[in-house]
Amino acid sequence: MSIKISRKTNEIIIKTANTMYVMGIKFGKFPVHLYYGRNGRGVKYEYKSPVTSFSPYFEEHGYDYFPDVAASEFSFFGYGDFRADALRLRDMSTGSDTTMFYYKKARVLKGRVDIPGLPCAEADENTETLELTMVDEVTGCELKLYYTVFADCDVISRYFTLTNRGKNPVKIEKCMMLCLDIDKDDLDMISFHGSHCFERMYTREHVAPGNRSIFSRRGASSHQFNPFFMLCDPKATEERGDAYGFNLVYSGSFLSEVETEQCGKTRVLSGLGSDNFSYLLEPGETFTSPEAVMSYSNRGIGQVSRNMHKFTRNHILPNDRFEKRPVVLNSWEAFWFDIDEDVMTRFAAEAAKVGMDMVVMDDGWFGGRIDDRRGLGDWWPNPDRFKNGLGSFIDNVKKSGVKFGIWIEPEMINPDSQLFKEHPEWAISAPGRELLLSRSQAVLDMANPEVVQYLKDRFEETFGGLSIDYFKWDMNRHLSEVYSPTLPPERQGEVSFRYMKGVYDLLRWLNERFPNAMIETCSGGGGRYDLGMMKYSTQIWTSDNTYPVARTAIQYGSTFGYPATTMSCHVANHGDSVENARQLEYYYRVALNGPLGYEFDILKIGDTAKAAISKQIAEYREYEELILRGELYRLQNPMKDGAYSYYFVNEDNSEILLSYLQAFGDKKEKTNKLKISRAETGATYIDTIGGNTYTGEDLRRGIEVKSDKDGGYARMFHFVKE
C-alpha cells in the first residue's frame, strides 16, 4: 500500500519506490506539508510554525499557526497568506474573493479519479489515490484534492474538483493544481524558454528572493516556455543531488510560479493561473481541474528526467499502432504547396525503393489550398489535384509498398475559404474589434460544440473508408481576441479552457474513429510539446528547425521532461547536405535521438545518397528499441560543452548506445571523456560498430573521444555485453 492515513498522529504518508511525501492535519482542519524526499530509514520531519510580525493568525490557535508562513498543502487567497495562492474564489453574491477551505476527511481510493473531457495519466493495478475533502463554510463549496501515486515511476499527480453546494454562484479566478512548499530557499531553477524554431532552450539560474514564473497566455503551451521545469540544489549534477521535476497534463495557457519567502521556504505552484482563465460555478455545478505531476530524486537531475520518461511511456502515451515506428518521408520541404496525385505517387515509389515505411502528404491537398492564404476549413480533396479522389490515389501510393499519412490543421480557418463564407461567426474574434490574422489565418471556436461536430462530420466524409495510417495534426496560430458568442458575458473567461476541451474531444474522436492510424501532433513544430498532446499522439514534431546545430540544443532540452520516443527527428536537405556524405552522416546521427524520419525531394536525390539513406534506415532498425524504450543519460550540454553526448541503456545494462555530436570545429582538438555509469563492473562489452572490446570498468572510467577541428562531426558506439 502506497498511501497510509494515521488517525493517531493525524499524518498522511505517501510512498513511491524511492520517495516519501508526508502531510499532517493541524488542529484538525489545516492540511500542512511536512516532508517530500527520499524514502528510507532515519527520515525526520516535524511541523514548525515560525513567529513573524505582520502575519495574521487565528485567535483560537494563537502563534501555533500563521497562514502567511505555514507549509500549506493548498494555499488560498486573501485569508492571511500573502504568498502566491493556488485557489481564488469569488462569491458572486457578495463580491468577496477571500477564500478559505477547512479539512473535513480523507480516504484512499484504488486506481484514480478520471478527469472528464481532459487528458490524464492511465492507472494500472498498483495505482492508488488519496482524496482530501475540504469545505468552505461561507460559500458552501466542497473542494476535493487528489494525489494519485504512480509508485514505479516515483511520480505523484495532483488535481482537484470543486463543487458548488451553496445557494449562490461562485467564480474561480485563479486555478493551480499543484502547490508544494519546499523547506529550502537555496535552489536552482531549470526551465526551457524559446521561440518558433528554437524551442526548449535550457536555462539554469539560482532562485533569487521573490517570484519567478514561467507561463503561456497564448492558448497553447507554446514555443516560448515549456510547462516542464525543475528545481534542484545548486550543486546538483546529472547523477548527484536533490532535484524536483514538475509538469502539466495540459496543452493550453498555463502559469507556474516559484516563490521564496521570508522564513526560508520555497513555494511551487503550477496550473491554469488567472490571466486566461476564470470559471463560473452555479449551485450544483462541479469543475474538475487538469492534472499536474511532480517527481523527486536524491540521485540528480538525470534521475528525475528518467522518472518522467518512464511515467510518460507507461501512463501517458497511447499504444503504438504499428510493430515498428514507420520511418516517414514528408512532402513539405520537397514541394511546399505544389503537390498532386502524380507527383505524390512518384514520390512514394522512390521512397519505397530506399526503405522508407511511409510517405506523408503535407499541406496543399485540400479545398483551394495553393498557398497559405486560403482553404483552411475546407477539408475535402482539391478536385484539380486529385481528379479521382483520395481513395484511388491512396491505393496507388500503397501499391509501392509504403504506408500513407496526411496533414490536417483542424483548429484553423482562412477568411478565404468556403467555411468562413458560411460561418464567419465560427472564427474567434472579439465583438467590435478587428479580426487579426497570423499566417493569413484565424482560429476556429473549438469552445463551440457545433464547430467540433462539424469537423467530425467533415473528416468522416473525407476520410471515412480510406486506408489512412497516419495523421499529422498541426496548429500554426495562437489565440488572441479570445471570445465565443456561444457563452454569456459572465462565462467568457472559460473560452480558452473550453477551447482545449474541444480540441481534446476531436483528438479522442480521431483516435477512436481511426484506431489503426497513428497521430503525430505539431504546432509550428514544438509549440505544443506537452503531456496533454502526448496523451493522444504517438509522437510530436519536435521543431520546424531541422538544422543540426539548433536541433541538438532543442533535443537536449526536450529530454529533460520527455522521453525520446515522443521526439520526431527528421533528416532534411539544407543546401547540398543530403548529397554531401559527411553532412548526411552527421544529420542522421543527430536524428537518432528519437523516431527517425526524412524531409527532402527524393525525386532529385542521387543514387549515392539513396544508398546511404538505405543503410541508415537499416541501422536505425537495429537500435530503434533501445532509442525508444531505453533509459537516457545525458553527458554533455551542447550549449556549454561544445558537444552533445548521451547514451541509451536497456534495463539489464546489456546494451548501450553512446552518441557524440559536435556541431562546430575545435581547433584545440580536446579529448572528451564520456563516462558510462550504467556499465557493469566485471562485465565485458564489445562495440559492434568499432569492433573494440572494453571492460565495464573501462566504460565507467570513460570512452575517450577527440573533438574534431572541422565540426559537423559524430561518433557512435554500440556496446553489447558478452
Image: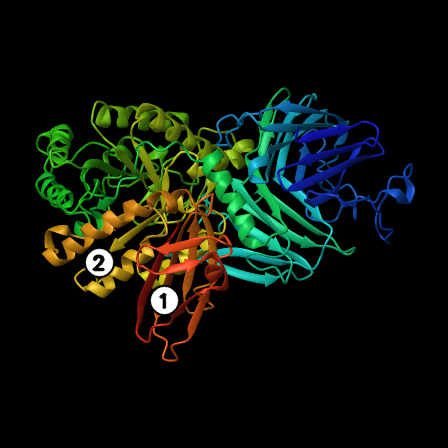
Q: In this image, 527 relative to 268: left or right?
A: left
Camera-side residue of 157 and 227 = 157
Q: Quadrant of the N terminus?
A: top right
Eyeballing the image, is 400 above or below 261?
above
Camera-side residue of 612 and 383 = 612
The part of the image, by quadrant, that contains residue 587 is: bottom left
The part of the image, by quadrant, that contains residue 24 is: top right
**Category of crowding for the residue at label 1, using alpha-carbon neighbours closer than 10 angstroms: few (below 14), some (14–19), many (at least 20):** many
Q: In this image, 234 relative to 496: left or right?
A: right
The residue carrying mark 1 is 662
How is colour applied across the structure in the image? Answer: rainbow
The residue carrying mark 2 is 573
Residue 195, image x, y percentages: 42, 57
Q: In this image, 568 relative to 310: left or right?
A: left
Is residue 346 visible to the viewer in this orientation of the structure? yes
Residue occupying image coordinates x 45% and y 28% = 486
The amino acid type, in three-letter code, at marker 2 is Asn
Q: Nearer the viewer, mark 2 or mark 1?
A: 1
Residue 713, image x, y percentages: 31, 67
**Category of crowding for the residue at label 2, using alpha-carbon neighbours closer than 10 angstroms: few (below 14), some (14–19), many (at least 20):** many
Residue occupying image coordinates x 37% and y 55% = 686
Q: How many numbered marks, from 0 up?
A: 2
Q: CA distance from mark 2 to mark 1?
A: 19 Å
